[in-house]
Image: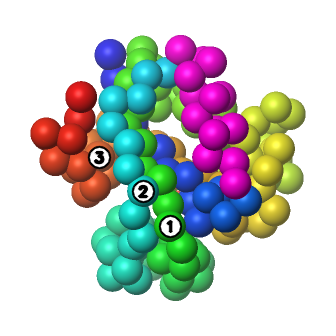
Amino acid sequence: MERTLSIIKPDGVGRGIIGEIIKRLESSNIKIIAIKMLKMTKKQAQGFYAVHKERPFFDNVTDFMASGPVVVIVLEAENVITKYRKLMGATNYKEAEEGTIRKDFATDIEKNIVHGSDSQESASFEISYFFNSFEIV
Ligand code: ATP
Ligand code: MG
């Protein structure tokens, strides 16, 4: 069993598709083992995306992530990191495969509806960034 962190970004929450995304997770046999809504400060968004701090889009993406509420979710399943990234689709929605969340809903390379951890190391960092052990069931 593997775990990963999913975030429904401010555009996904604002568009009213929290339920749609959760439905796609559950119908793919991915188990939700922790979930909450929160609004990050700019500092918290910078800490979350610290791996990207030298990238040209860092300031914009951290402004965006702090611009409204997000839903953070811990997922559990076999190979869930890869499995969930397949459900999300490519970072750039224009390159995402048909039927993926980003292909269906994203409007911008930055406003791309969902986040998913990209490795086991980033998953453990990202899960513990938002949840303590009592909140994971
Ligand atoms: P995420 O980490 O959010 O799941 P990802 O792993 O597909 O997305 P990353 O390369 O980690 O993509 O980029 C983090 C986020 O930064 C992207 O989801 C997107 O919102 C934004 N981003 C990435 N590349 C660009 C870019 N070239 N221009 C603008 N924003 C970008
Ligand atoms: Mg990433």
Image label count: 3
Q: As shown in the figure, which amino acid type bears the numbered disc 3?
A: Ile
Identify residue for label 3.
127
Could you say where residue 84 lies in the image, as x and y percent from the top left?
55, 31
Viewer-nearest of labels 3 and 1?
Answer: 1
Looking at the image, can residue 78 be seen? yes
Could you say where residue 127 lies in the image, as x and y percent from the top left?
29, 46
120 above or below 57? Answer: above
Identify residue for label 1.
69
Q: Identify the residue shown where x is 50% and y is 67%.
A: 69
The answer to whether residue 67 is magenta is: no
Identify residue for label 2.
37
Q: Secondary structure at mark 1?
A: loop
For marks 3 and 2 on the same chain, the one whose residue lies earlier in the sequence:
2
- Quadrant where the image shows the C terminus: top left
Q: As shown in the figure, which amino acid type bears the numbered disc 2?
A: Met
Residue range in magenta is 16-29
Q: Residues within 10 Å of mark 2 (few under 14, many from 20)?
A: few
Say left or right for 79 vs 114.
left
Q: As shown in the figure, which amino acid type bears the numbered disc 1?
A: Pro
Q: Identify the residue shown where x is 54% and y is 78%.
A: 67
Do the residues bearing badges 1 and 2 touch, measured as CB atoms within 8 Å? Answer: yes
Q: Identify the residue shown where x is 28% and y is 55%.
A: 130
Task: Give the distance between the C-alpha atoms of the residues marked 3 and 1, in whole angstroms.
Answer: 17 Å
For marks 1 and 2 on the same chain, the one whose residue lies earlier in the sequence:
2
